[in-house]
Image (tube, helix red, strand yellow):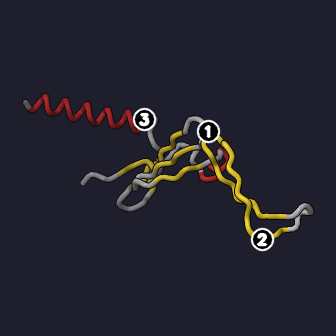
Amino acid sequence: MKENIKPRFEVEKLAGKLDRTFARPKSDDKGMLLGGFEYTTEKCDAGWMVYFPSGSSIHVWTEEEMERQGFLNDPHLVNMETGDDAGPMANTSLKAKSEQVSNRSRSSRVAQT
């Protein structure tokens, strides 16, 4: 039986800028909190999308948060059946791996005809 091994995550840097809404506590001129929030929208770096093997994804706004979460490191592989770490990922991109599988599949079909 073949093991179901996938990278723990894949990262994509988004281009450009996006609107980001910030919530800040309301305060008076002296800095006393009044209760509630004031919302402002600012143009910020678009950030990163992080994709997971389950099909879910998250948006991360800052490089500091990417580093804190460990998404700037090379991902390890994970056994999808057990959740066990399957070691470091080879220096092959998912796209290159997909192309390799596709090429092998084509060559085996040609050999069978």
Which residue position holds label 3?
92
| SS for callout 3 | loop
Please name the residue shown 47% across and 49% down the image: 51
Q: CA distance from mark 3 to mark 1?
A: 29 Å
User: Horizontal placement of 33 versus 12: left or right?
Assistant: right
Amino acid on which disc 3 is placed: Thr
- Give the label on residue 17, or none: 1
Q: Quadrant of the N terminus?
A: bottom left
Sequence order check, earlier mark of 3 and 2: 2
Camera-nearest residue between 26 and 47: 26
Q: Residue furthest left?
A: 113
User: Horizontal placement of 3 versus 7: left or right?
Assistant: left
Q: In the image, residue 91 lies at what x, y percent? A: 46, 35
Above/below status of 32 relative to 86: below
Camera-nearest residue between 8 and 58: 58
| SS for callout 2 | strand
Amino acid on which disc 2 is placed: Gly
Q: CA distance from mark 3 to mark 2?
A: 52 Å
Question: Depth-wise, is mark 1 or mark 2 nearer the camera?
Answer: 2
Q: Quadrant of residue 92?
A: top left
Q: In the image, residue 83 lies at what x, y percent? A: 42, 60
Q: In the image, residue 40 lies at what x, y percent? A: 71, 53
Sequence order check, earlier mark of 3 and 1: 1
Which residue position holds label 2?
35
Sequence order check, earlier mark of 1 and 2: 1
Label 1–label 2 contact, CB within 8 A: no
Q: Say few, some or many: other residues with alpha carbon within 10 Å of mark 2 (under 14 / 14 to 19 / 20 or more).
A: few
Q: In the image, residue 111 lies at what x, y percent? A: 12, 29
Question: Depth-wise, is mark 3 or mark 1 nearer the camera?
Answer: 1
Please name the residue shown 69% across and 55% down the image: 22
- Give the label on residue 78, or none: none
Amino acid on which disc 1 is placed: Lys
